[in-house]
């Protein structure tokens, strides 16, 4: 049997199961007795379909789609046997890092979309500090501050560090969400968000380098930069998954491919929220402080090592050797 025939024959049952799952999100009490019986039958059938797909169409997107569908159905059917605390722990110890590893290519592309404009803008602004105003008219105020040696970031705590931390977290979450949501426009707006932020940071860094202000600037960015920028890349990669599903749905319909990509990308976005809280806290309490640059660099290095060790190694299935 071809994958297309398998999908055509089974998709009505999968779509019915999806509708039942959506109705039961607030509990099985939302379903009638007949619906509960149908839910159990369709769940067992989907589990069997997943086994067939893994055996016969392992490299096809239908396997990934069914894996997600069965996972959602399992969560609804067996919700009473698991606490929310355990589900949350399983998400952050297993689901989130595994999703990051499964989609690292999209994160890499998002990084390049940010990094390349940043490098170009850095070189251009370093050679001609006035060139940045062509892209960012408001950057002239930043240039003036840099010329005068004014460390404007020290004023972010004027209203209290807790208030500034809240503002920073909200702003960072907004940037991450725009990078993610932009994927629905075939990834074009995601590219814009990444390139814009990369070019702006590169321009500021180039101007700071030209006026001998770079140590001050990097002294502020270093502590929180690794986590904050990483989250932007993760969110951008999540958005690019949506765009890719629309551009290249494979043998699935665009709607189905988008649903699969959205569910997977949403896992990344949810996992990014506590990381943004951490980055915002560091940016409010450590980055603008008078701590020595060496301490801030140590915070940057430690946060980067901890973050990527967690993402690369957490949730891996132990391998057993044979005697």
Image: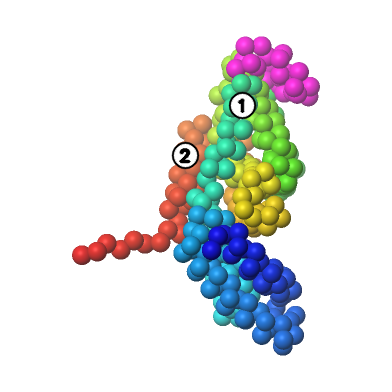
Q: Is 134 colored magenta in this rendering?
A: yes
Q: Give left or right: position of 143 versus 1.
A: right
Could you tell me which residue is drawn at 53 percent across and 68 percent down?
50
Could you tell me which residue is drawn at 45 percent across and 44 percent down?
305
Q: Position of residue 180 (x, y in %)?
A: 68, 46
Magenta range = 122-148
State the colouring used for the structure image.
Answer: rainbow
Q: Position of residue 53 (x, y in %)?
A: 52, 64
Q: Secondary structure at mark 2?
A: helix
Q: Secondary structure at mark 1?
A: helix
Q: What residue is shown with label 1?
A: 118
Query: In the picture, residue 81 is in which quadrant?
Result: bottom right
Q: Residues within 10 Å of mark 1 (few under 14, many from 20)?
A: many
Q: What residue is shown with label 2?
A: 301
Q: CA distance from mark 2 to mark 1?
A: 21 Å
Magenta stretch, overall SS: helix
Furthest-left residue in view?
323
Q: Nearer the viewer, residue 217 or 135?
A: 135
Furthest-bottom residue in view?
33
């Amino acid at each position: 049997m071809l994958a297309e025939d398998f999908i055509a024959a089974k998709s009505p049952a999968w779509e019915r199961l999806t509708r039942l799952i959506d109705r039961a999100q607030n509990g099985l009490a939302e379903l009638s007795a007949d619906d509960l019986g149908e839910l159990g039958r369709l769940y067992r059938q989907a589990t069997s379909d997943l086994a067939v797909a893994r055996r016969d169409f392992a490299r096809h997107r239908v396997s990934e789609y069914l894996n997600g569908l069965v996972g959602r159905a399992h969560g609804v059917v067996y919700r009473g046997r698991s606490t929310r605390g355990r589900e949350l722990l399983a998400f952050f110890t297993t689901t989130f890092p595994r999703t990051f590893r499964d989609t690292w290519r999209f994160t890499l592309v998002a990084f390049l979309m940010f990094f390349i404009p940043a490098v170009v803008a850095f070189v251009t602004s370093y050679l001609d500090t006035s060139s940045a105003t062509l892209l960012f008219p408001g950057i002239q105020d930043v240039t003036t501050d840099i010329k005068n040696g004014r460390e404007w970031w020290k004023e972010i705590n004027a209203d209290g560090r807790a208030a500034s931390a809240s503002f920073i977290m909200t702003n960072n979450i907004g940037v991450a969400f725009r990078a993610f949501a932009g994927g629905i426009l075939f990834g074009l707006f995601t590219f814009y968000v990444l390139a814009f932020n990369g070019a702006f940071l590169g321009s500021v860094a180039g101007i700071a380098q030209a006026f001998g202000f770079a140590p001050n600037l990097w002294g502020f960015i270093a502590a929180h930069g690794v986590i904050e920028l990483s989250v932007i890349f993760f969110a951008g990669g999540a958005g690019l998954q949506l765009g890719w599903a629309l551009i290249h749905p494979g043998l699935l319909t665009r709607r189905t491919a988008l649903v699969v990509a959205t569910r997977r990308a949403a896992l990344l976005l949810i996992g990014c929220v506590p990381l943004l809280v951490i980055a915002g806290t560091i940016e409010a309490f450590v980055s603008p402080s008078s701590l020595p640059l060496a301490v801030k660099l140590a915070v940057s290095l430690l946060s980067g090592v901890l973050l990527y060790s967690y993402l690369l190694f957490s949730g891996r299935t132990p391998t057993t050797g044979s005697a």
